[in-house]
Amino acid sequence: MLKHLAGRLAEALVALVLMSLVIFLLSRVIGDPVALLLSDSATEADRQLLIQQLGLDRPMWQQYFTFLGNALQGDFGQSVTAGREDALELVLSRLPASLSLAGVALAFTLVLGILLGVLAAITRGTLADLAVRMLALLGQSAPSFWLGIMLIYVFAVHLGWLPTSGFGGPAYYVLPALTLGLFTLAAITRLVRASMLEALSSEYVKLARIKGLSEWSVVLRHALGNSLIPVVTFMGTFFATMITGAVVVETVFAWPGIGRLAYESIMARDFPVIQTVVLVITAFFILANLIVDLLYLAIDPRMRAAG
Amino acid sequence: MTPPDRALRVVPERAETPPRPAPSGPPILEARRLGRAFKVRGGLLHALSNVTLSCAPGTSLGIVGESGCGKTTLNRLLLALDRPTSGEVMFRGKPLSDMSRAEMRVYRRAVQPVFQNPYSSLSPRMKVRRIIAEPLSASREMSRAGVRDRVIEVLEQVGLSADVADRLPSEFSGGQRQRIAIARALASRPELLLLDEPVSSQDISIQAQILNILKDLQEDYGLATLFVSHDLATVRFMCDEVVVIYLGRVVERGPAARICTTPDHPYTAALLAAALPADPAAPATDTPPMGELPSPLSPPSGCAYHTRCPFAQEICKQERPVLKETPRGEVACHRVSAEGWS
Amino acid sequence: MTRDLSFKLALGLLVVFVLVALFGPYLLEHDPLRGSLRARLDPPAWAEGGSAEHLLGTDRLGRDVLARIVQGARISLAVCLVVIAIAGSIGTALGTFSGYVGGWVDRVLMRLVDLALSLPVILLALLFAAVVGPSFLNIVIVISMVLWSQYARMSRGETLRVKNEDYVDLARTSGLGHVAIIFRHVLPNIAPSLIVVATLQVGVVIVLEASLSFLGVGVPPPNPSWGGMVAEGRSYIVTAWWVSALPGIAIVLVVMAVNVVGDALTDRINPGLRGRGA
Amino acid sequence: MTEPLLSIRDLTVRVGKHPEAPSILDRVSLDLMPGETLGLVGESGSGKSTLGMSVLRLNSPRLAAGTTGQILWQGRDVQKMSARQLRRIRGEEISMILQDPMASLNPVQSIGVQLREALRRSGKRNLSAAAEAALAEVNIPSPADRLRAYPHQMSGGMRQRIVSAIGLAQDPNLLICDEPTTALDATIQYQFLELLAALRAAHDMAMLFITHDFGVVARICDRVAVMYAGRIVETGPVAEIFARPAHPYTRALLASVPSTRHAPRRLPVIEGQPPAVGNRPRGCPFHPRCAAATDQCQSVPPRAEIRPGHVLDCWHPQEIAHDPA
Amino acid sequence: MQYHLKPRRRAAVLGASALALLAATPVTAETLTVAIPTFSEQTMTPWAGSGQRKTYLDLVYDYLVYIDAEGNAEPGLATSWEMENEGQTWTFKLREGVPFSDESCGTVTAEDVKYSLERLIGEDSRAGPASTMRRVIDRAEVIDELTVRVHLKAPDFLLATGYFGEAQQLGIVCKSYIEAQGEGADAAMPVGTGPYTVAESIDGSEITLSLREDVDHWRVSPDFDEITFRAVPEEATRVAMLQAGEADIAPVSFDSIPGLENAGLRIVSAEKTWSPVIRLGGTVQTDPDRFNPDNPWADVRVRQALNYAVDKQTIIDELFHGQGTIANADTPVAAWNSVPPYPYDPEKARELLAEAGYPDGFEMRLKTFTTTPGAELPLMAEAVALYWADVGIDVTIEPGDWPSIRSEWTSGKPLDFAMTHRGFPFANPENGVEAGFSTKSLFASFTSDELETKLAELGAETDPAKRTERLTDIGHYIRDQAGAVFMVLANEPYGVGSRVGDWGIDTSYVYNFDQAELASE
């Protein structure tokens, strides 16, 4: 089992370095940041001065290796715009906001998704089944920023129940997590419904009924256990969608997360921060995938033997 | 759907099989000390070891064994879908491994397979005509009209009407699909049919129809057949000679009639007992099958069957018996010396 | 009963969407790109203050919202079709190859798929837009860069299933080469599942394009995409709700229809795949 | 004459509520005596499995909606039972073994959990001891470790024996076996049938044994009912049916089974295929394929008891003795 | 970094069914909440970033010279100042006894002013005007504790109200405190002489300023004990916050104005703070590398036609909701008030185009981008394109972003496209004109030999009255030559909630949140 994990870690490192190269080149090609930092009335001398200060005058590959060398020691360079703050520190300071939001959103989507999925499967073919799927579908078909703004106007402006935006206590999580999660809700509901239908028509569920168990215990103890396995395998993808959606949701809800930091740093051509943010996000995905692998082993004994 | 036609011969016809004409010419397909081992997590799995057999023109050889005995691996090796790790597959005396592309094309036409599951043998998206014509596509000598006639001809040989050619496999029952699969095998006028459990997944009435068609093909066209099955009764009906395989090794070979009446190897006896006859009055057996099939990853020492053999002695645990020639055929069992039972 | 009704309804809606996208622009009397500033932000005909001149009202440059929705349908459909073509072909080619060949090739490609699935598509779109400037091509490339992995994952799984069918072994015993087998047997039999993935992805693409427009890197103005219209109209959701609400509703209807049709197709082809499409 | 344990009267199962909907079972009647092993034999599509499932009302909702007729279990009609009553007889009074041992066990739960789940309902207190005893009774070596193992770690034969242990955990009076050995190798099937016979005697329970293999029927059943196209065409004691099969279908079927004892030049054959659920012929369903058919066979054949306990539905019962292969 | 539940203006009473976890918090200190699009660099020293940070820094630091509503100088930290040596030497007298917020710093001294100036124009300063100030200013000299003399390399007659004025970035810091912070000075809590100090700065979400209890500030006595700035990038969210009472003041786009007025909120505008303009590439006639003769608009008549063809008043009424006046130049300059803007005359535009040899118009590319302020630039581009289309000019709009367009604009190549841009009021109008219209500037968009000589003469002129005359003449010249397509002198509207009483913004001192009064209940 350990060999399997070691293999996956090695692959993860390769992926990270690969990603760092891609991002490094891409951000260099963006157009140089100096143009942005120079004030309107700057002269050529000022431009050279800034280039030299930022070390952009050295050849590209040398810049990359210095970057990689520093990165390994945790020094991802200084944020070009945010007053010389250390890029990694800046990203890590914004990380808890994004992770907590993605976590809350994923939790609420999983719970609601599984409930709706099971409900739809049990009431298969009836109106309830259709209604549940349409409700879940609504989340997937409405652009998240539109949904977010609508929720703000309804729940914060008209009803005044919740804060419109900002980062703070539990109340601040409700609307952003709802917006972020709704997008994945349809996917989870559909997945759970499909695997539940498969489980309910299986022989081992028939045998459970033969034992005389009540329909509820058959559904909860036998069918649900098996139908959650595919949900785990897709957990990595759902987490990815969360972070991807965060860029929009964090902008709409003024949430100080890394999604918004990435957006703003790209607009401000802040190389070091761009590289750091994307690398941290990619590292997180790889970590999420590793965790999913472990979860998968824990849930499905068949995998444990193959381990 | 083809309407059920009326002909029914209810009164059982129980004539014995007339003696077969002696096989003529060199063997079409031979396996010489064939072996195949797979690398798996737990070590080396010997699916097949030291199997020797040959199919002469017009003969019918039966391979009998239970799941995990390696009969499917053998079939894939003979069809050159897989390469042996030891031993050789010979076609007309020449090893497959060093045959040119042209020679391989002749081999491909001469030896045709029929698999067990009719639902998996026909590509769902292809009309029956193209399925049957596929083996001819490689040879390219036949003109389009020639192919069209050949398709009709082989459909009639398996008792199906010409209009079947333009329909999709999904429109046919299991039995009809298996007939189409047989027609496909006949298309390139083969000399040898490799039948891998062709009737195991069919109902009794359909099984009988297909077995009769195969028997007709053997006798009317002198087709050689290699019939792989787990069911001794079917092999008795179809084949002259039988080879019994256990955990990838040949344990007994002999004429079908003899094997089914006085088996030498205890495993063959157990198989015979397990093939329950459709007769409540049949005498109970004195060699009932015992024990579980051991894992092929770690076969028992000495004779692989000793863990389930009622006659197992000390020698059986230490030393693997060699396949010995006897007047009754071949057998690999310490209890049976060259002359007969010791 | 409800299932067939919802399927027919959804299918009807999709047909309307495609027809509007193909022929709508020719039937319009208003030019979706030109409007008069005087008639800026007029409400739809049925709302008070609205006029029959502009059935669904006008946007902030006085352009007819109905005309832009019709023109937008064409652009949104075009984005979907091009993405499906690019992502579909690349994904299927890689997935089929990986499933058919197996071994380390399969492992490497699947690792690539996992990485692609984890790519933050919106950030990449922003980076691309900064490099090349927002354009139709840029959006299509970026969205395809991530969505190809859905096709790859599906076509790999299906190829593995088909590869183990007997008719593939039979084809090899007839001497067919690997390429012939892939084209005669593998592709035709995995096509239905890929069609399902394509259907389900129409929804994902439209919504993704809307998010990109929100961040300013969507289909470049002045030509309208539904997502772009919703993004443009968001700052006056209260005073001129119709500018973003109507295209928003159009998106919701089409995406829902696509998902209903997608699920129904999955049931007909092989229920086992249900839910794994999106 | 003791009361039958299970009495099925005019059971008809249609695909859906509509009276004209195609029927899988067509006015089937059958009695099962206490302690008796009744065989139910027929080709695929004959409806034998659906009959088995109907006893415990395990059919799909669509089929359940199209089910008419009575299934009397110790005098009470299962069709009319409330969900709670039905649940009480499932497992405790009637139990089942299904065909595919691989799929019958929950893949993510250990053997012990699934066995104890059944034992708990039977009121046994020391569950782990009872579980070990149950496994020992079905010849499972070292039961203690096996309880912790998972289904995928066992062979097909062993898994089927565990399913039997689960089936017997609540001492049912009737065990329904739906082709339990079809997926097993012959040598494993032989030993399983021996075990099943021993268990039946030990628990003194009745068995309804559904199979398509006449050899198995001969080996384990007391009486046998032959099904064709949703109907029972012939019923009788095993020795009687095998020696003197009266219905043309039974005779033809018995004749076309290959045997290890002799090899005819060609097997006697019934041409054509069994009719699909949709288009079943009027009158005797077998008449289009029956050599002995006459015009009379277009109408529903009478039911006759040609010998004590030997009943068949046919206009032309065959009298010639059948020489067993 | 700790988070706490913000006290919200309207105690949200929740029904039992609603989220019980929401505790209603009473409102204690009087807090003014201002929602702004971005904190930009969110650094705390005047030289460590752009001018956008003045939003919160102008309440922490004071400036030497302030400017009243009419634009005349008012004493700030400098009570008086003299210009000698023909504008090349300036001496400032400092206000006595103005305490820094940190006791250890004591009161403001000449040393602090000298240090502040040197850091602002230092090599690694990121401030906007730093590079131009570096060209003008030589060094500062401490005469005595409250007198500092500034020596210039070139005469600047408006230094006091220009670079040293409140509209620029020369906030006075405490030298000892900054030197004590060393490397972390930029991010450390700022020490200034302003009415507020920074209580808390949560990266990317909130900056809270609290009123200094210890001092009765010399310039202003604010009503609000606490001012909280929140970074809210999305316009629709800022509008929602105003309506929900979560924000008292927030900059809004012109399109949101009707919605806010319907909801009973006030709009307060900073007058003429930025001016949208369309600059025509490749018209730097004095530099052969950057002049592109093939552009249709190389001909002055075409440039004039481009101005005549656009109905600028309708654009102001419709797109800017009347929040602006028709522009006569690319930046508001008092001296150019007499310069007449181009009227809307499509006929004349067609005549001029015909005369110039383009009877049926031509094709052109118009690049556009969004910034803050400037969200409306792409919209304006599309509107202008509509009008130009009426006179036969086929415009292709190319949305991009400021950095890439700007690097293309300053690349020194002969450009063949136009771009939307925005001008800002310059501290010193003469420098402003140079930036846009003199060959020296990388950023020049239109130059001519005649204009070069006019600029040189202006530079050499020492008599202030004559300087204004020459400046006005230059304004007329640029207008007649249609150096760009001048559009709007636009305002910056702010939505203002009911909690804020009287609050006005005069042109130069935009971020006067400290003057916002508490509404009388």
Image (tube, coloured by chain):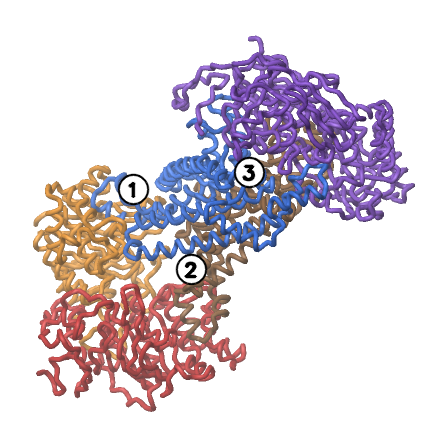
Chain colours: A blue, B red, C brown, D orange, E purple
Q: Which quarter of the rendering shows the C terminus of chain B?
A: bottom left
Q: Chain of mark 1?
A: A
Q: Which residue is mark 1?
A: A219
Q: Is residue D32 left or right of residue B222?
A: left
- Amino acid, disc 2: Arg
Task: Count all numbered tags in the image, as a single digit.
Answer: 3
Where does label 2 land, which residue? Answer: C107
Q: Amino acid at mark 3?
A: Arg
**Horizontal and vertical percent position of residue E353:** 88, 40
* Tag 3 residue: A84
The quadrant where residue E62 appears: top right
Residue A262 seen: yes
Chain holding disc 3: A
Q: Label 2 marks which chain's residue?
A: C
The residue depicted at 65 percent of the width and 31 percent of the height is: E118
Judged left or right of residue C182, residue D208 is: left
What residue is rendered at 41% in x and 77% in y? B186
